[in-house]
Amino acid sequence: MELLENYFCHNEKCTHYNIPNNGNISIRGKYGKNKDRVLLYCRICGKTFAATRDTPLFGSHLPPDVVSQIVKLSAAGSGVRSIGRDLGINKNTVMENISRISQHCAVFLDQLLVSLNLTDVQFDELWIFIKKHVLMQTKKKKEKNGSEEP
């Protein structure tokens, strides 16, 4: 498990809310089917929360290594059914995890882009760079699959 200094209290009424590395977080115990999940608590307000809170793993019943495999296979272009077959899990479970992870990424990227404080020109240049990269990747896939028209 990561260092406790990386965690913070999730109780908005707590005086240590959203302040990491404050020394107020402790381990309350383990939970889950295999007792492999960590339950933390704030020593100031006494509220408990899962160590996976605010992560894509929160609410998933799959082990972290399986979720990681879903991400890797999905990013490599594998289909949902194929991932399910490869990992021995239901396609609906794969889809739920991809959905949860993509929502988490969207929130993270929104916050990241806002925190960059880009001017309109800088943002436009960033978008052109990303679009060019995506188009190049699409062209490479077409060439690889032999669907490039002469």
Image (spheres, rainbow, N blue to C red):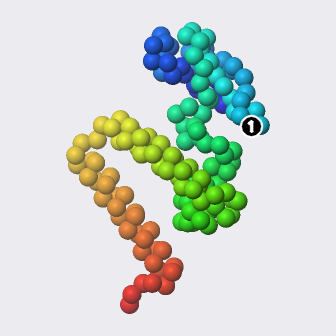
Foreground pick, 19 / 15? 15
Q: Determine the image quadrant of residue 129.
A: bottom left
The residue depicted at 69 percent of the width and 19 percent of the height is: 28
Quick one: quadrant of the N terminus?
A: top right
Name above or below for residue 85 compared with residue 103. Answer: below
The reply, left or right, for residue 122 in relation to residue 20 is left
Is residue 132 or residue 81 the one in the foreground? Answer: 81
Q: Which residue is mark 1?
A: 33
Apparent side of residue 105 relative to residue 6 in the rendered image (left or right): left
Image quadrant where residue 5 sits: top right
Quadrant position of residue 88 = bottom right
Residue farthest to the right, as pictured: 34
Q: How many marks?
A: 1
Residue 51, position as x, y percentages in the image: 62, 29
Q: Residue furthest bottom?
A: 150
Residue 80, image x, y percentages: 56, 62
Residue 47 to residue 56: above or below: above
Q: Residue at x 49, y 12 (%)?
A: 14
The residue at the point 64 percent across, 22 percent down is: 40
What amino acid type is highlighted by mark number 1? Lys
Is residue 50 shown above or below 110?
Answer: above
The residue at the point 60 percent across, 33 percent down is: 52
Whether residue 20 appears in this view of the structure is no
- List x then y, in percent, for residue 15: 47, 10
Q: In which quadrant of the rendered image does the C terminus lie?
A: bottom left
